[in-house]
Image: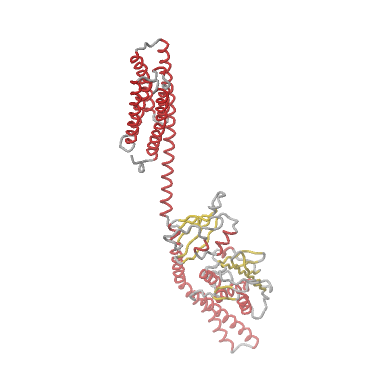
Amino acid sequence: MQTDSLPVNEQEKWTRLTRLLYFRTIASLAVLTATIYFFYEPSPSLQRRLLLGVSGCFFLFIAFEWYLTSSTVSFFKQLLIQFGLDLLLISVLVVITGGIQSPFVFLFGLLIVAAGTQSHVMAVLLTSIFACISYLVSIYGFSTWHQIEITPAATLHMLLQVSALFLVGGAMAAIARRHASLQQQSHQVVRQHRRLKELHEQIVTSMQEGMLILDQGLYIQDSNESARRLLLLTGTDPAWLKLEEVAETPAALVQFLNNSDRELFQCEWNMPTGIYLVTVTQLPGDDPSARWLLTLVDITDIRRLEKKLAEQDKLASMGKMIAMLAHEVRNPMQTIAQSVEIMTSAKQSQQKKIQQIVSEEVGRLNRLVSDLLDYVHPLSPGLIKTSPSEVIGSSVAQVDFQGEHRIRWVCEIDSLMLDPDHLRLVLDNLLRNALQASEKPGTIEVNMEELDGIWELSVSDQGGGVSEAIKDRLFEPFASGKSGGTGLGLATVWQVCQVNGWQVEVEAVTGGSRFTVRGELPRSKVRGK
């Protein structure tokens, strides 16, 4: 019978049945060989013919039983057929070899034990009953054939033998019941494990998120179809490929995997297929072949939506900007008009004061227009080899052209691949913000350095820090905590950083604030000596 499509427990039954048949074939051959060797020569001609007949029947029975294994006869019926034929052969052997004195009487008990190995209680009980009946029939058959009277001692011996067979049958039935119960529990666990495994495979296969398993050397050990699609490896097996060989891996991700001090890490990964959020989890255990789990979530649509929302927010803020611009322009223009009107009739000392007022108002208008143009100017990074030292030096020279504030700056990086105009725009606005906050000269510091695969630009001041009222809206347009401020400088900084993929944050330091801009070091960066 074909067993490939059967459940686990059914397959195991047919496997046990086949093994039993193998065992019985070998054991029966051994018994027949011993019987012929010891009993054929000294036996009368009739018993010899019976031995030869039993041998022939044995081979016919074995062939018939092998045929049944490929038929549709049930497992239980095949067990009964095998044990029934065995009982018939054993009974004939006992009759031929001496009845109650036959050395083959033990085979009845052995057959009951063999039935108990099949974990079928009914088969054990039926085999025990028919073994006792066959034993008694064979003993009485031998006595009748040879006309031997059964003595009371022989009767007692038979009763003891039957009792022993029933005792063996009861013990094997209990063992078979227990074995069947354990097998049923085992089969349930196996089926549940199979269902969970199939469910796990279905979930992993149907996931839209990519999954990668990395070993200690960052070689890919396993992946799902989504990960292979995201990495442009559809139809191939990326096993034993190093992560850095598959795609342009972010430097921050490689830095974390090589020098990890945390169990969780997230970053964005720009690929030709889109933008993905990578979450890295350190797997528990000490298995070096499964050290890291990477999940890749497609956030391309989210970033595109954020960009559209930012553009809509910018358009929505244009109305507010126009109203603010009209208000801010009207006040200085009125002041300038009044100053010009009274300048002709003013005294010499008053004219200098009026000129100073006009100059301040013109400067205020110029700052407003400059900030406005910087904020609404479309940004598109153009990466070129840039000297950060030159950018910082020119920005400091322009913002503090008279050298009154004595800005101190240090740059430890010789060259970077980035947009110098964008870096200059960020630095100019941060420096103007620091100059407005700091009154004492020598309190503004600019520092740029490389830290763990990223570059970091910081501008520190001692202007008293950022007030809590404005801190949460510091990078929003028109949010200003200073009188005369337009609220567009830091908003421009945030906008430039978003376009370039940089991070900007502010923190409180002793006596003031520190603005920090961080960006990933490109692979083509030339490190400063």
Residue 154 falls in which quadrant of the image?
A: top left
Q: Is residue 173 visible?
A: no
Farthest residue, direction left: 72
Q: How is the image coloured?
A: secondary structure
Residue 156, horizontal then vertical, whole percent: 42, 13
Residue 324, horizontal then vertical, whole percent: 50, 74
Residue 20 falls in which quadrant of the image?
A: top left
Q: Is residue 373 left or right of residue 21?
A: right
Q: Is residue 109 left or right of residue 364?
A: left
Query: Count the marks: how many?
Result: 0
Seen in the picture, residue 198 relative to 448 is either above or below; the reply is: above
Front position in the image: 213 or 245: 245
Q: Is residue 182 visible?
A: yes
- Quadrant location of the C terminus in the rendered image: bottom right
Farthest residue, direction bottom: 344
Residue 260, horizontal then vertical, whole percent: 59, 57
- Quadrant location of the N terminus in the rendered image: top left
Front position in the image: 107 or 476: 107
The residue shown at (41%, 19%) is: 102
The residue shown at (46%, 71%) is: 314
Seen in the picture, residue 418 relative to 354 is either above or below; the reply is: above
Seen in the picture, residue 473 relative to 183 is either above or below; the reply is: below
Front position in the image: 455 or 90: 90
